[in-house]
Image (cartoon, rainbow, N blue to C red):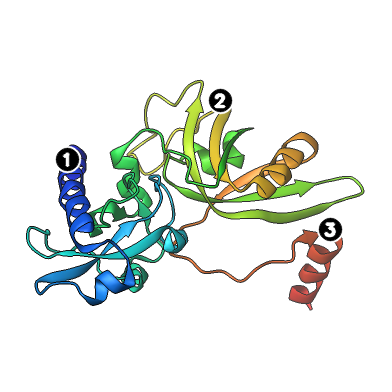
Amino acid sequence: MPRRALLLGAAGLCAVLALAVIVFGGGNDDAAAAAPEGSTDVLVASADLAAGTLVDRIGGDVEVITVSAEGLPAGVLTDAGALDTYGGQVLVTDIDAGTPVLPSAFGTPDDLRNETAAVPVPEGMVEVSVTLEPQRVVGGRLRPGDTVAVVGSFDGETQRTKILVRQAVVTAVQTESLPESDVGDGAVEAAPTANFIVGVAVSPADLERVVYTQEWGNVYLAVDPTSTSLAPTTGQTGASVTNDLAAVAS
């Protein structure tokens, strides 16, 4: 469904739900208990939700209200547990507070990239940009809506490499120039040579770590799909890598 149609449909449904809330008393327990026949529970946003937000993180910003079933489109979610079906996906459109949650609001980062050239910063997050050479940004293949791991690496006395942030949403990608054409038969692409400025959405605490690493160390971005579930890492040092290599060689 085109995004404009989705938003207009949601806006109309909001008006219906707003009237139903007035009639039935919204989420009030007494009103819900006395809800007339033909009513149904509907999951709505209790706060504004931004496109790009991981579905796994919106559980605290939705609520169930009781409304008339008449006129509701098929597929409207009726309880927060239904969000589990969309775990690992992201919102591909903004959802205003009071708006019903529809399955069409969810999708993969690829879906989000098709919707917009830039991704809004999710609620409770901040946006920071890092300037990186192509080899530190997956060869320049990142696009808004991708999710990445932010890796910090220090040399000198610190000499440590560790994942700083997991599954951060890429909000914007800029570069001075891109290769004009592919190489050969298209199986090998021409490599970019200009730096990239990549915006990512992170928590305030992660913001400090990312900025510190950008100033005093090296930052790498790695593709980190929301569908993956990896165990936490402890980081690596020169000594730990050397020990690992020795163990493999023995």
Give left or right: position of 133 versus 34: right
Q: CA distance from mark 3 to mark 1?
A: 56 Å
N-terminal-most mark, 2 or 1 = 1
- Residue 159 point in image, percent of width and height: 85, 51
Q: CA distance from mark 2 to mark 3?
A: 30 Å
Front residue of 62 and 114: 62
Q: Which residue is mark 2?
A: 194
Q: Secondary structure at mark 2?
A: loop
Identify which residue is drawn at 51% across, 56% down: 224
Q: CA distance from mark 2 to mark 1?
A: 41 Å
Give left or right: position of 179 versus 163: left
Task: Determine whether 35 is above or below 161 in the image.
Answer: below
Mark nearest the camera among 3 and 1 is 1
What amino acid type should be assigned to the residue bearing mark 2?
Answer: Ala
N-terminal-most mark, 3 or 1 = 1
Q: How many marks?
A: 3
Identify which residue is drawn at 57% across, 35% down: 134
| Residue situated furthest top in the rendering | 176
Neighbour class for label 1 at 10 Å: few (<14), some, many (≥20)? Answer: few
Disc number at residue 238? 3
Give the quadrant of the C terminus: bottom right
Q: Secondary structure at mark 3?
A: helix
Q: Secondary structure at mark 1?
A: helix
Identify which residue is drawn at 7% across, 62% down: 70
Q: Which residue is mark 1?
A: 8
- Residue 167 point in image, percent of width and height: 53, 55
